[in-house]
Amino acid sequence: LQPNPHTIERESCTESIQHRSYNISEGLFTHCTLAPTMSTEEEGPTEVGTADVDVKKKEFVLSFEDITVHVPSKSKGCLSCCSNKNSPLRHYGQEYFGMSVEQRDAFYTLDRVSGYVKSGETLLVLGKSGSGKSTLLKSICSRLNQTDQLYGSVSFNGIPIGKSNQSWRRMCSYVSADDGTHSPVLTVGETFTFAAQCTSDGHSTEEEIADTVDFFLDALGLSHVKDTVVGDENLRGVSGGQKRRVTVGEMLIDPNSRVYCLDNITDGLASTDSFSLIQQISAACKKYRMAAVITLLQPSDEIVQLFDKLLVLSSQGQTAYFGPVDRDILQSVFLEEGVDAEKGDSGGIADLVMSQTTSSMEDSAISRFKTSPTNLNLTKELNTIKANAVSLNDRESVLKQFLPAEKYSTSRLYQLRFIASRRRKLIFRNSMTYARSVIAIVFGVIVGSLFAALQQDTIGALGRSGYIFLSSFLVLMLSSAVTIPDGFRQRITLFKHRDSEFYSGRMAYVVQVVMDLPLSILEATLIATISYWWVGMTPGADHFFFFLGTLIGLECVGQAFARFLCAVSRTQVSANVASSLCILLFATVGGFMPAYSTITWVLRWLSWVTPVAYAFEGMMINQFDGTTFFGLVIVDKNGTSTVGNVDGTKYLSSQSLPRSQWGTNTQVKIFDCLMLFVFAMVLDVIAMKYQESSRDWYFNKIRRSRATVAHSTEGEEVKSGDAKLDENDTEAQAKSGEGSMEPESLAVSNLSYAVNIGKTKSCWKPRRATWGSLLGPALAKIAGKKLQSSLARAEEEEEKPVTELTLLNEVTARFKCGRMTALMGQSGAGKTTLLDVIAGYKTGGVITGDIMIDGYAKEDATWKAMNGYAEQQDILNPYMSVLETIKFTADCRLPSHVDKNAIINSVIELMDLSEYTDMIVGHEKEGEGLPKHARKRLTIANQLVVQPKVLFLDEPSSNLGVNDAALVMGAVRRSTDAMKLITLVTIHQPSKKMFESFDDLLLLAKGGRVAYCGELGSKSQTLISHFTSLSGKMPSASANPADFVLSVLDGGSPDEAVAKFKESDICKQLNSAIDADVKEANSQPRGIATTHSLHFFTEFGLLFRRQFLVQWRNPSYSFLRFFVSAGATFILGLLFFDIKNNVQGAVFAIAAIFFMTFVLVIPMQAAVIPLIEDRAVLYREAVSGTYSRFTYGLGQLFADIPFHALNTIIMYAIIYYLVGFRSGAEFVGYFIFMLFLANWSVMSMGQLYALVTPNEETANGLAGLSVILSVCLMGFLITSSAMPQGWLWANSANMFRYILQGLVTNELSGQNYNIDIGALIPPVENTTTTADGSGRFLAHLFDDSNSNGKVITFMPGGTVPEGDNTAAQGAALLGLVLHAGQGENKVESEQDMRDLLQCMVENKCLVEPVPTNFLECNVVSNDSQVSPVCFDQFSAVIANLEDSERHVGECFIDMIDHAEHTSMGVPASFKLDAYTETEHRDIASCLTRKLLIEGPDIGLNSIIKGFSELWDIVMFIQEIIEKGIDIPGDAILYYFGWSQFDADKFEFSAPWKWNYCVIAVVVFLLAMEIIKLCAFNFIIWTKR
């Protein structure tokens, strides 16, 4: 056996890595990973490896012929009924959304494009925006959208590949232009390592993979950031340019790839880095016989010359040119006949091929190409390729030699291993992992302590039912809420990996499920362990572990449900709303309230497909089955009291549990628990199948239809006005600039800027990530700042005790009126920093030096009126049209006396925005609205409309193609000339033509020092001459001067360049000009532009109008909110349809209002997202002086009110009459008013979270936590009387408590609700046994013959009648009263009766034997010398009888005939000892009748009244009557602590719905609005 050639090649590569000797022309692909690594022991004979190497080295040709991509039309969907243009519904839809609802017609994004690229070659694709460059790359590498129709053929050696070929996708790598697809918490090295593992053969050792990764990192210049996290907007990681290289390298590392499709891979890279990267790719393709198809935006000639072939696409996706990079041939195609080549081709090659500005010019160029010899050669070559292709029978076998044989590079088992390793890192580095544990502990403590005071009685049973429901709801909601954001973050990376066939999507999903399970178990265990025992649930390990297992099942269901929503939802907003709605539905039909048997038949089936119903049923059975608890006290007419213990099983029956008794309760609860895991499995299986369903939408956002305003809100006079403002319109200019001066120059002298950094390091060396370093994202989300990753912050040398970092160092420059100055420099030289300092946008650091206007020092008071600043990011309101955006700025910042329409039209013309005036700006990230170049021009126009004197532009050509950049810079040039502006522009990679459109250049070297400041000269000769003398090299005539000066600066010493400029005549002239300006300024008075400020109400009106339009056009704020409210309230209306006038109806009314309050919370995130989006707009406009922040906040506040009102009407109209709430003007009015306040308050709370948190995820998370806390503490699941004393403050501080209390009071107060005791109260044990052997239940006590024979009462606080306690004496007295029958006293004296009862209880007069003790205490004593202890009180009550002595004496007539009576008619000879207990009872009953007020039940009620003060009765005593009794609604409110009891009047009242609930909600609302207004003024999240 011979040594494996791959091993030999890898060893040589490893040795090269160790010596770190690389050739830039061989750097990127020289690593031996291009051939699979196979050890001799594992793979056998050498021939196998040699054969593979031979296959790899075979020549190939990739051709594409007549590629046509047809994008299907977009139907109107639910708006198809609006096809009639005159349909009112169609106009309503247009006006409602503010956007066109027209369907999108089908179109061709590519039209018969042909070409080829051979092994060893590179092909450059150029085209205008929307020409289909990216679509062509996706067509070549089989990554086209599934809905798009591909015609033509993509062939490999003449063999068609097909539209979607998995093996071809592995062989053809694709690099997108999106750098946001990485996992931010993984380091650069880990990102590369994972890609290498995915694309290895599965047998590579860790060392070999590490060697591969190190090689690519070094070749891409990323070695020094190997251990730095990639980062995102919340976690600062690598720079933008470095992230671009990470994106490229991650795909290039695949050893299976022979063809590379690279989309805009030089975005964010400096010109030298771009040249180096393309040079490496070109050299590697030639050496290793690979091919690359690359699109670039603004390539220089030096970069273009590196390519072998060039393909130019027209704006309609047609082939405008394919052939060699030959300037003469290109001139013959793209220059019109008769045009001088020197004049027509004055820029670079990219400028030449993109010079066709009209469709007719493009058509002419296409026609010239079709008739050219170059096109003929293309046709011949394509025919030759097809002719040389193998026969049909041999194609499959030949393709197998080139294409990978397996579906994936690695086995399923190997995939599980490295995907699990990556998932583990993501879990442990995700701050939410630790936050979830903390949240579980916090909620465990809160819920446990809230329900800790429950007793083992009926009230406690109801409370524990609430605890079970809350636990189910809490676990499901938390698990779902924390999974959705993570799922949306990870799915972007998944889409990228799956496009490249890195691994199986199913394997990735299985790993996610398994790896997330331990965290679910931990979270459920924390909640259960803390709260279960604290609440006093049923003891026993079996009960606890069943409870825990059910919570774990709910955790699994919540996460599976969230993963399902992530799979089928396009956006996180829709997933969040769907999650909240579904969980609300789960809760309402879960069996807690209403019970299963009372759910309307229309929705009852939902209970069987709801996880919460199974969890609630199982945990309720686990808690109550086989248990008993104190429920009732039964008192018979003999005075005997019996404690009634409620059987838990019968209590379950009263709650309609189990829903179906198909087996024993134990079997049912086990089945319920297992069903939760079945639900989770089913949801996961569905989610696994559809997890990539939104991939096509995500990667094809740009195809979303653009939107236009149906009817202009600005009127036709603005758009159609003929007035224009240009350099010749002196009258308009005078009006717009009245009272101002026209500055001739802006200068800075010795300007320095330093920031305090504490300590700086002389050299940075990366280190590995640590646990502590990875908690940064959590702090970032809390603090709202980007945290620098500590991974790149370990020092190699000692720290130097430097407290300041100088970013600008004595910058001196002068900028002239009517001239454009390019601000360029090395990476990190401080270009944008200088722009910010001059413009006054830097709020921190130390600024020294002078900023002067015509020699006068800059004054902050007037500076805002003179300058305009267009930032690199296009910060615009996405829901306004172009015209509305410009006009709003003009109305806010221009004086009222100027002709604003003329200025607006002039700016629109200068910026060439006429065709976009009615187009909505749209969300750039979503690919909707304005194209990038028009968006950039609108950003600039927004500054020009205020008629500035100085214009600052930060990277206006960034991320734009050649033509788009030319459009933007051409507009800037026209504006500078027309408006005589002082224009200062930072520029990154200008083409030659663009660079020469500037007049002057300010070049900064590293350290913020000036390397050049002066004129460019004709064809940049002045600039070239200066740098030629510095470098000693003369650039070629076709070289780009910008690239030349930067290469000189990069290749030489920055110190030398700075020193050379200071010694030059240009610098001396610059200093002289500044000195002359200062001298002239000192000799004459100053004239500075006056500031303009709007009247407060005018400004408020403008902001109110804009905010109203924005919210009206925002579907997530308006339509989604209304839809959710309507749908949720309709479901609630069906659930609680037509409530009855009984206690169950009262409970249903309370439940309906409770769930309706929760409905208000669901659209809260609709308030969060728009405000977070608008914060950047607010900061930009407020800083530029467009308006004040206070007025903005006030305008938004009032603009929200109509939406609150409309949502209130929608909810009221649906739920009020479906549920059957009480009628009456006062009650309806109160309901609407409180619901309006609730709508306003909830949305205001969401907006407040949006202002005080750094991002959308944190705001929604905080909102969700506050809602859960509010649900716990609002007084429904556990009443305030049952809450521990320590939580009452939280109940009082809960805004939702007052909303619920007010609405419930409005419904229940003043109404009576019938209660059927026999049907409502559970069965009672410990009573007599009936003939059939069953226990005597309440239903058996309702006997006509004994209808007034017994009294049942709930004793206060669960008190059991024992011994001589008050409850026992009360029960005895009730028995005596029942035995006595109807009263005879005609006069009621409540105080006398109360005194008598108190005396008897205190002196133990009602203990056994009750009649004897009753008589001895009140009327007669065995000791004739001592009066009875309660004689006076008894006499006071009896005195109310007419002829009281006779009445009393009647009770003794049967005992002693004609005896002499003593005081109160008691016979003097009467002795207790002389009579039996039965006779004592008869006498006592007779005397009791004399005490009681005559009339049915009145006497009994008087006794109850008397005892009310002694017992503080909460659940009051009632007489049992077959027909039931009426309970006042205020008494039900009293149970919740929402009404008061007047002992004197013996009545309940709830007077607080107006003067307490409404005022409390208003106070909360005012407090939130005031805090919001303050937050608008102090917002810091969007500051620089």
Image (cartoon, rainbow, N blue to C red):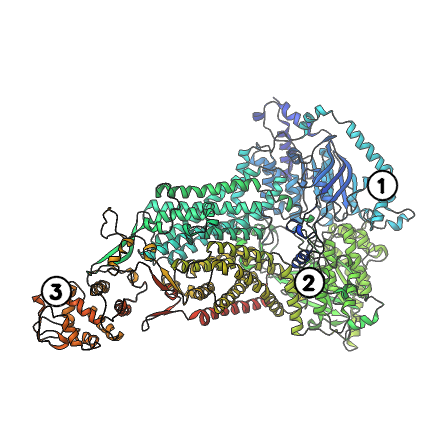
- Mark 3 neighbour density, 10 Å: few (under 14) some (14–19) many (20 or more): some
| Residue under numbered circle 2 | 836
Q: Secondary structure at mark 2?
A: helix
Sequence order check: which comes first, mark 1 or mark 2? Answer: 1
Give the quarter of the figure containing the N terminus.
Answer: top right
* Foreground residue among 245 and 1271: 1271
Sequence order check: which comes first, mark 3 or mark 1? Answer: 1
Amino acid type at mark 1:
Phe
Left or right: residue 883 versus residue 549 is right
Amino acid type at mark 2:
Asp
Placement of 354 over or under 1083, stated as above or below? above
Give the quarter of the figure containing the C terminus.
Answer: bottom right
CA gap, disc 3 and disc 1: 129 Å
| Residue under numbered circle 3 | 1479
Numbered label attached to residue 369: 1
Placement of 1074 over or under 1114, stated as above or below? below
